[in-house]
Structure formats: C-alpha cells, structure tokens
Amino acid sequence: ILLIKSSFIMNRLFLVLLIFPLMFISCEEEVDNQNNDDQNNNNSVSILGTWRFVSETITDHVGYIDPVSGNEVITQDYSEVYNYPLQDPDCEDLLDYYDFLDNTMFFIETCGDGSMYIDSYNYTLIENELLFNSGDMSGLGLTITELTDNYLTLFSSNDMGYTENDTTFIDRISYLLVLVKSDFTYLEDQNSYNNKSVRRNHSFVNRKMSDR
C-alpha cells in the first residue's frame, strides 16, 4: 500500500512539474502575442494620404504677467471657429487639404470655380509631433492629438508675447484642426496652379502679425 501511495504521489508530482513550465510558456507566449498585437495596432494607422479640413478653431489668450506674483493674468479670450467650406470674397466654397507623403506634405486650397493653390513642405514625424523645416511653415510644429483611419486632429500653439518697458505681455494663439480622410486628387506640379493663397491673405494670424 505504501508503495502504491508513493508511486501515486510521485506520478502526481511528475505531472505537476511537467505541466507547470508548459503553463508558464503558454502564458508567456500569450503576453508576447498581446504585446505584438498592441504594437501592430498602434502602428497600423498612418498619417499618409490626403486629409480634408472640416473645421479650424483658433483661440487667442491675451494678458500679462503680474510682476509681483509672477502669475499670468488673462484679460481677453478670443475664439473663432471656421467650418469648411469657407465663404471668402475671393473664393467661394473654399476647401483646404493636407496630403502627407513620406517626408513631404502638400497644402492644397481649392475654390468653387475650380481654381487651386498648392504648396509643399518638408516635415519630420517624431512620435506624434510633426515638425516642418521648409517654406513659411519652417519651425512650425503640429501635435497629432487623434489619428484613426478616417479622422485626424492636429493642435499647435504659438506664443506671440512680448515685453514692453518692464511688463511682459501674453498673446498666445492656439489652433485645433479637424480633418477627415479624402479621396481628392490633384497634380503635384505646382506650376499648374495659382501661386497665391486666398485663405492665408485673410488669415487671423496674419492680421495679428501685421498689428505688431
């Protein structure tokens, strides 16, 4: 009886020792597969392609820095939302597009009469930061706040503050761009289109800069 019990115990112990590492390997493979799936999901969405502007929200915070406390004092908040298509005196039914290729982005502006403006910029994508290094967008950064197969939001903030006498004034402009994926097509030959952007000539930012 003792021999039978000992044999039964040894067999149970053998099975435990055999199954335990198999369970560990199985769990490890499941975790690895889950990590790989997560990585694939994170990397499966690409910014490459053509995106159409849906809306553009511009917010301006104006104020100064309190010289005693060092805190910001906001005296004026301005916000304006542009929903596309825009109605401009020089361009009815204005639509804007971003087309992202590898390291190059095309900005396309179209009017209802078929006229079009196009420009291109070099960019670098570092994680969720788009950094531009050419043209009038040189030095500008856009943060990707949301990206799906069909939806993209970009955010940027520009500090236009200045110091006058002993007072530091605040003038912080932020942009929130909402875009959707588009099948819009165009020729990449910029000489085929107008060399003047309607939208930028009337932009809020340019008006602010001209006031300086």
Image (cartoon, rainbow, N blue to C red):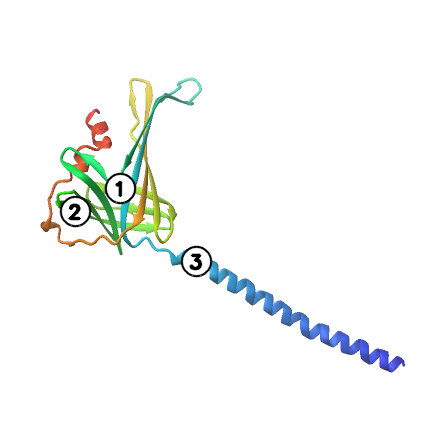
Q: Nearer the viewer, residue 92 or 147?
A: 92
Q: CA distance from mark 2 to mark 3?
A: 33 Å
Q: Secondary structure at mark 1?
A: loop
Q: Is residue 143 above or below residue 160?
A: below
The residue at which mark 3 appears reads as 41
Q: Number of labelled discs?
A: 3
Snapshot quadrant of residue 141: top left
Instruction: Of the two numbered discs 2 and 3 on the same chain, state the one appearing first in sequence.
Output: 3
The residue at which mark 1 appears reads as 139
Q: Is residue 20 above or below residue 161?
A: below
Q: Nearer the viewer, residue 134 or 180?
A: 180
**Which amino acid is tagged 2?**
Ile
Q: Is residue 112 above or below residue 209?
A: below
Q: What residue sits 42% from the left and 22% below the top?
A: 70
Residue 118 tag number? 2
**Which amino acid is tagged 3?**
Asn
Q: What residue sits 34% from the left and 47% below the top?
A: 152
Q: What residue sits 32% from the left and 53% below the top?
A: 47
Snapshot quadrant of residue 6: bottom right
Instruction: Of the two numbered discs 2 and 1 on the same chain, state the one appearing first in sequence.
Output: 2
Mark 3 nearby-residue class (10 Å; few <14, some 14–19, many ≥20): few
Q: Given the current orientation, which residue lies at the most extreme right position?
A: 1
- Percent coordinates x, y for residue 79 in the rendering: 32, 29
Residue 75 tag number? none
Q: Are marks 1 and 3 in contact (CB under 8 Å)?
A: no
Query: Relative to residue 194, is residue 47 drawn left or right?
Result: right
Q: Secondary structure at mark 3?
A: helix
**Which amino acid is tagged 1?**
Gly
Question: Quadrant location of the C terminus?
Answer: top left
Q: What residue sits 60% from the left and 69% below the top?
A: 25
